[in-house]
Image: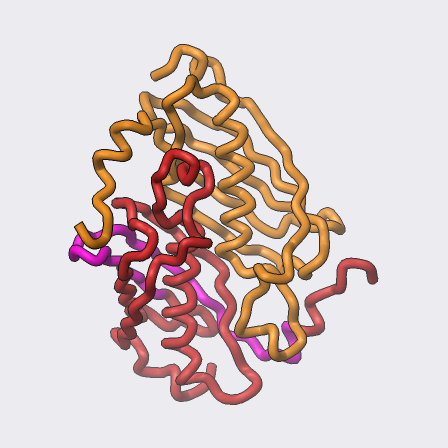
Chain colours: A orange, B red
Amino acid sequence: MPPDLEGLEGFTCSKEWIAEEGHAALHLKHMGLQVLATPYMLLYGEVTARECLDQHLPAGMASVGVEALVRHLAPIPVGSRVMIEARIISVDGKGVSIVIRVKRHDGTLAGEIYHVRRIVRLEELKKRIKQPHS
Amino acid sequence: MPPDLEGLEGFTCSKEWIAEEGHAALHLKHMGLQVLATPYMLLYGEVTARECLDQHLPAGMASVGVEALVRHLAPIPVGSRVMIEARIISVDGKGVSIVIRVKRHDGTLAGEIYHVRRIVRLEELKKRIKQPHS
């Protein structure tokens, strides 16, 4: 584990997003209901958490998401602001656990995510990935 | 609960996807690693599960995702086939639990998702959604 990951527990990052129209739940769209689909709530949360970790990783290393538990608590209208707060709760070997809270423009808690990322060497990851037609 | 949801336990749907280039993990892309990001694995899984349920819902009703536990087990190269199998494991009131398995083009298990959807009346859902500037 890179030494600068030690002591990261409790480190918190926040990021503001705008719920994009292209990220609406398609099956509700035809009813005039333009709300963010759960996978995009996870996307906003993962990117916020990853960027929070990235600033502490040495060159040649990255983190990959291995697990996420997503609870979608309230609808987020498309076009509205979404506040994401990612808090590192533990660093254990190459695994980093992060809790992400998603708040709606009106302050309502719209989602909670428990997320685990693994620190990997990019060169090793490359070897693990076989191309589809190889 | 609509009467035709009774007896759905064990009902299974399968759907084949192609991992889209626009759904690659962006932080790995600049390294030449074109692999599907976890939120899009969830997107493919949720859409497969929702369409599986939709065919059993009467007009005016829909399902919304409320919870998902995603485990990402193996990388999925962009451009390759992804097989999704969604199996309804229980129906309890308005809640439907679904287990989703994600297989890679070479047969490797690439992901597992435990997913809960809630059956809602579209008219009631509409009332719950406040527009961002209202």
Residue at x 32%, y 46% (from the top left corner): B72
Q: Which residues are magenta?
A: B98-125
Which quadrant would the N terminus of chain A be assigned to in this image?
top left
Was residue B107 drawn as part of the magenta stretch in this picture?
Answer: yes
Q: Is residue A97 above or below residue B95?
A: above
Q: How many marks?
A: 0
Say which quarter of the image contains residue B75: top left
Where is residue B94? Give x, y as percent: 47, 73
Give left or right: position of B77 versus B37: left
Q: What secondary structure do most residues of the magenta stretch adopt?
A: strand
Res B8 quadrant in image: bottom left
Depth order, front residue of A38/A30: A30
Is A128 magenta? The answer is no
Q: Residue at x 47, y 50 (%)?
A: A70
Corner quadrant of residue A12? top right
In this orientation, which residue lies closer to the viewer: A22 or A118? Answer: A22
Compared to residue B41, the image places residue B126 above or below, namely below
Q: Residue furthest right?
A: B134
Q: Residue at x 67, y 76 (%)?
A: A32
Q: Position of residue A4 (x, y in %)?
A: 45, 12
x, y (%) of residue B45? 37, 62
Determine whether, in the image, residue A93 is placed left or right of residue A50. left
Percent coordinates x, y for residue A33 in the rendering = 65, 72
Q: Residue at the location (63% across, 33% down)? A: A14
